[in-house]
Image (spheres, coloured by chain):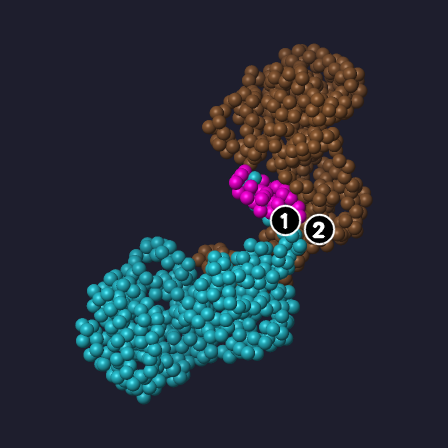
Chain colours: A cyan, B brown
């Protein structure tokens, strides 16, 4: 037996559901499905199980399944949502579960029965994937495809892959993670058959790697495909929809993390890579040392996390960081690196590490070419009153030197954000973040104050350590 | 009599040559011309006077004239040069003048007779200006055009204009001055007839102003003309060559200085604007105060002025300043403003006033997109050894953080310039400057050292004052 096989066996002993767990999940799933089927039939619909339960690829600690309610495609959307919620509630009440309404493409019932999470999701039963009205309508086709193509020996291979990704923070296609979805894991195993084969092959993946399970495309069409899925490092053509990249959510960073950990495992097969490393929060002395060693300034922008789902929250925080970096840059303050953090409940924090955070008293304003007469007139009028020097001309452009309004990046940040919500939105700050910032925000530079946040929230301390000890991707 | 007329009268009393000066100049000019004619005739050529003497527009302190030797256009260039020098030397020896050889389009004899400067310049006598072989061949046509079109009352108008420009540092089309040539002055007076009319009209000039004395172009062709003479603020179509802008050398800055002083004179007609203001060299306390008030750093790059004519020296210094600013910017050091100085003999100095002159210990290296496989490989190889952080990915581009090699702009400047002449040239430093810098250069930041230069060279002190007290162009 090869060394890695021993490791896989050990790992599977931890992550593979026990027979009694399987039994419990299947029992409840069948019960829920049966009720759902009856209810669906009443209005001309069907019900089916979805999620990892249908292919036996779930991890021990993840007891959950989905039930899809398939309804006729001629049903108006309003009706579909209404029926979906009606059936969901009815089923959950009949099995004595707790539930609430969640919002994705349609509102749906998300419940819990005996510790097992159950989502009941309505969708249209379309004839073929080209006819779908929204992404959920595609799921039944995925279920069927995987059922047909994932051999039973592959279930544990998928489990190994999922656990490997999970332990390294890259499992999940959600906006925070930007990693590998469950369906993507299953397709990769269908394609490479064994987890170890996937590992051996992925180390040779290049950005723009194409995996086309059904052979929809000729190799000569690959360059065109790469253009279509531009900036996406891994292109896995969906076997049920050749226009779709199953790996679209995967970030370039995570693409390389996967290659890196695969290589690490192949060089030294052992179980460590399947279980998360423990990371300690940063300590004050380390925070100070990092800043001395780097001679940079850390600026935190802190505000209340808007009450929205993580898939909206994270992209809005990232967008905010981008916008603020750009605004600082327009004022000659230069960000070296930045990152975003949120506990998804109380706090949202954007970290800027500054390369240039203090500037002279004078600021040069470069205007239009002197030949652009209208623009020149406007520019000259705008700055004439406050000119310390000028107007003068450089490279045929009008210039002034004026008194700099904001001498530090901190002051500029404060001024840019200390505005009402309308102005914040006009500056390109996303809606929910703009609303929170317009109510309140803090700008924090002092190490003691940074450490106060760490004391209250260990995860922020871990985030800071990861920020400074940013790992190499190669 | 209007107020300005009184002023003009007073000014003319100073600047108009006295009768005995005129007599002396004309006497010598005729003598030189006569000899030149005889010599030229021997080889089938002609001779003619050129320069302000021919239109009686010279200023009292500028006793000089040119003699052009017109030779047949079928003569080989080598022969033309040879004959030109031969005649020049012969003439100068016969009038007992001193002379040397200067280099313009062709080498020519530049001499001095009784305190009067005489240039003897060979050119081809072509049938029409379209047939010229080099710019000097055009001069005889200019002489004839002005002789024909400049009425005698205009001579003093031209003198007023020249003096007005000279006093304000914008007379001369040479590379240092980038101002108005004598011929341009004459054309402007031919067009506007009176100096006062020129002043009244120029305040309404806009960049891209077109003056077409001979009406070569329809107004509908003006936009096309402005494209042809792009980035040239004043377009005066040469009456003897409609493809040429007589004002091509005029910088945008000087275009606006002219408009500004014209306006000043019209608002308050008095003689002051016709005589240079006295400017005192900067004092140490002022130098320090300026830097405190601006919170900037002054860096001087000082080297021996290359032994080349000013028309080559000045553009090379300006180009050097541009290149070095760009190199600094590529290393995140930001120049706020810059300027160049030379006494045209000993020293050349480039001044950089820094907006950002000190940077963190870490430096971010941003590389190619991860999808550019070859470039990525090169980039990753190049920086992997010295990485403090990374490689990581930002906006799908490879990044490293490395130890910054140059923490200050001064260090970076020193390193970039402390190279042999080949490397300096490859960096875009112009030839003559590269040669001097490769031999020796100094980088000076300390105020005491800056003041040492001022003590040795008053003009540098004036340059510094002008730098800080840079005048508004409007």
- Residues drawn in magenta: A371-399
Residue, far front: B1
Which residue occupies the foreground of this view, A256 or A372? Answer: A372
- In the rendered image, which quarter contains the N terminus of chain B? top right
Badge 1: residue crowd in 10 Å (few <14, some 14–19, many ≥20)? few
Residue A88 is drawn in which quadrant? bottom left
Residue at figure coordinates x 23%, y 64% from the top left: A128
Residue B439 visible in image? no
Q: Is residue B240 magenta?
A: no
Residue at figure coordinates x 69%, y 12% from the top left: B37
What residue did someone put label 1 on?
A: A386
Left or right placement of residue B213 versus residue B35 in this view: left
Residue A311 is drawn in which quadrant? bottom left
Residue at figure coordinates x 58%, y 47% from the top left: A382
Marks 2/1: CA–CA distance: 24 Å
Labels 2 and 1 in the same subunit: no
Left or right placement of residue A102 versus residue B167 in this view: left
Residue B452 at x, y percent in the picture: 80, 47
Left or right placement of residue B18 versus residue A241 in this view: right
What residue did someone put label 2 on?
A: B298
């Amino acid at each position: 037996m090869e060394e890695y096989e021993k490791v896989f066996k050990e790992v599977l002993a931890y992550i593979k559901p026990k027979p009694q767990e399987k039994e419990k999940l299947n029992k409840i799933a069948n019960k829920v499905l049966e009720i759902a089927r009856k209810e669906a039939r009443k209005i001309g619909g069907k019900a089916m199980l979805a999620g990892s339960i249908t292919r036996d690829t779930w991890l021990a600690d993840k007891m959950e399944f989905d039930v899809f309610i398939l309804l006729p495609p001629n049903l108006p959307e309003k009706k579909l949502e209404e029926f979906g919620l009606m059936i969901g509630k009815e089923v959950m009440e009949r099995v004595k579960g707790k539930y609430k309404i969640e919002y994705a493409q349609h509102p749906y019932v998300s419940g819990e029965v005996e510790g097992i999470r159950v989502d009941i999701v309505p969708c249209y039963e379309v004839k073929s994937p080209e006819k779908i009205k929204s992404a959920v309508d595609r799921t039944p086709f995925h279920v069927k495809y995987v059922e047909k193509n994932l051999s039973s020996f592959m279930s544990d291979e998928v489990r190994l892959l999922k656990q490997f990704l999970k332990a390294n923070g890259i499992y999940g296609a959600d906006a925070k993670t930007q990693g590998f979805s469950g369906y993507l894991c299953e397709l990769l195993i269908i394609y490479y058959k064994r987890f170890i084969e996937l590992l051996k092959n992925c180390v040779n993946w290049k950005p723009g790697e194409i995996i086309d399970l059904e052979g929809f495309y000729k190799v000569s069409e690959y360059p065109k495909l790469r253009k279509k899925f531009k900036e996406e490092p891994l292109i896995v053509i969906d076997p049920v929809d050749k226009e779709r990249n199953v790996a679209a959510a995967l970030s370039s960073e995570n693409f390389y993390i996967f290659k890196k950990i695969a290589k690490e495992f192949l060089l030294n097969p052992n179980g460590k890579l399947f279980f998360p490393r423990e990371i300690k929060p940063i300590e004050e002395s380390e925070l100070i040392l990092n800043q001395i060693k780097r001679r940079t300034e850390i600026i935190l922008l802190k505000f209340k996390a808007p009450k929205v789902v993580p898939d909206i929250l994270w992209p809005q925080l990232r967008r905010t960081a981008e916008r603020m970096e750009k605004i600082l840059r327009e004022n000659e303050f230069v960000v070296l690196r930045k990152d975003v953090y949120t506990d998804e409940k109380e706090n949202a924090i954007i970290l800027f590490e500054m390369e240039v955070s203090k500037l002279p008293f004078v600021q040069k304003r470069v205007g239009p070419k002197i030949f652009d007469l209208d623009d020149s007139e406007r520019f000259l009028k705008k700055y004439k009153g406050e000119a310390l020097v000028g107007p003068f001309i450089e490279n045929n452009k009008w210039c002034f030197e004026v008194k700099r309004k904001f001498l530090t990046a901190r002051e500029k940040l404060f001024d840019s954000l200390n505005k009402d919500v309308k102005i914040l939105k006009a500056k390109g700050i996303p809606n929910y973040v703009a609303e929170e910032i317009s109510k309140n925000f803090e700008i924090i530079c002092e190490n003691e104050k940074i450490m106060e946040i760490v004391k209250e929230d260990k995860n922020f301390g871990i985030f800071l350590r990861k920020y400074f000890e940013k790992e190499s991707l190669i």
